[in-house]
Amino acid sequence: MKFKRISFFIISFLSLFTPQYLIGQEIIEIDPLFEYPTAPEELESLTDKSNYLVKHFWEGFDFKNKQAVDQNALNDAFLVFSTPLRWADLQVANQSVDRLIDKISGNPTLLLQFTKAAEEVLYGPRAEIWVDEVYLKFVDACIKNKKISDSRKEKFNKISRKLHNTARGEQAPTFSFENKKGETAQYFPMSTPTLIIFGNPEDTDWRLARLRMETNSALSQALEKGKLNILFIIPAEMENWKESVSNYSDKWVVGQGVDILDTIDIRVIPSIYVIGSDGKILMKNVALDSAIATVMGLIENPA
């Protein structure tokens, strides 16, 4: 999950929020689909305000309308909804999303539109925050909906499989790859903390990041002593990849896995996973510095 700064303005004055886009040099305003609620002034804490807003946010939306709504306006409504959603109590947030899905499940057109909005706000490349658990609720609702065609469900089935397969807290999935010797190898969770980097060896930013890793004495010592595993896997077919990784440390496991994108959730390159000593996914799709700090913490303070 990635975060950006949250503004109290949005939480305190949601009813005054008007979506705007900057297209070229022209600002395009989009009229909200409904009037957004405002938290009562007597609620002082961020959590209380957020709980109120997620409970009441969609009350002004016309769920009885069977026609498609403006997708851009719905995307913006979902964006505003996502702000208090991330600060509400977990139980309140989940109940709010479940109630929303229950209301739209009988309208496949609206369900698909909400799922697209959730993808835009919580999962896709333009999302300010990634919340797989919430987006997955909409994806799975589409899969279960008998009124949605199988052709439309094909995309959702792939996403669902990858997100369930690589959910934080779950056992890391095994996968096969070709190693530098040309042999077929397999990754499987081990009892040693593991850093898995799915990346492109030709990427300039990654080359600089690898240099930082190789000059990190604490990281190198942990690797030398067998307290840490590091894998660098190219998640697609790449010509002459062995030449590109020929100078990688022999302590790293390096390879290419052409089918990995079908089973592993990779949304950025490099995509970095941290696997704990229990074989479970602790972090995924995170910045390298955060991943290194976490894995070194596991080594210095084993459970």
Image (cartoon, helix red, strand yellow):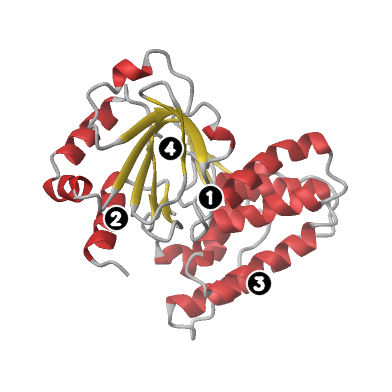
Amino acid on which disc 2 is placed:
Val
Amino acid on which disc 4 is placed:
Val
Q: Earlier in the sequence, mark 4 or mark 1?
A: 1
Identify the disc placed on residue 166: 1
What whole-number distance in Å separates the C-alpha atoms at marks 1 and 2? 18 Å
Q: Earlier in the sequence, mark 3 or mark 1?
A: 3
Amino acid on which disc 1 is placed:
Thr
Q: Nearer the viewer, mark 2 or mark 3?
A: 2
Amino acid on which disc 3 is placed:
Gln
Mark 3, Cα crowd under 10 Å, few <14 / some 14-19 / many 20+, is few
What whole-number distance in Å separates the C-alpha atoms at marks 4 and 1? 15 Å
Residue positioned 37% across, 22% down in the render:
181
What whole-number distance in Å separates the C-alpha atoms at marks 2 and 4? 20 Å
Pointer 4 residue: 268
Residue positioned 87% across, 49% down in the render:
146
Q: Nearer the viewer, mark 4 or mark 1?
A: 1
239 or 141: nearer the viewer: 239
Q: Earlier in the sequence, mark 2 or mark 3?
A: 3
Pointer 2 residue: 295
Q: Nearer the viewer, mark 2 or mark 4?
A: 2
Q: Can you say whether 201 is above or below 124 in the image? A: above
Identify the disc placed on residue 95: 3
Residue positioned 17% across, 44% down in the render:
220
User: Split into 4 quadrants, where in the image is the N terminus?
Assistant: bottom left
Mark 1, Cα crowd under 10 Å, few <14 / some 14-19 / many 20+, is many
Residue positioned 28% across, 36% down in the render:
252
Disc 3, SS:
helix
Does 285 sit left or right of 227 as displayed?
Answer: right
User: Split into 4 quadrants, where in the image is the C terminus?
Assistant: bottom left
Q: Position of residue 32 (x, y in %)?
A: 63, 53
Q: Position of residue 46 (x, y in %)?
A: 44, 75
Q: Position of residue 53 (x, y in %)?
A: 57, 71
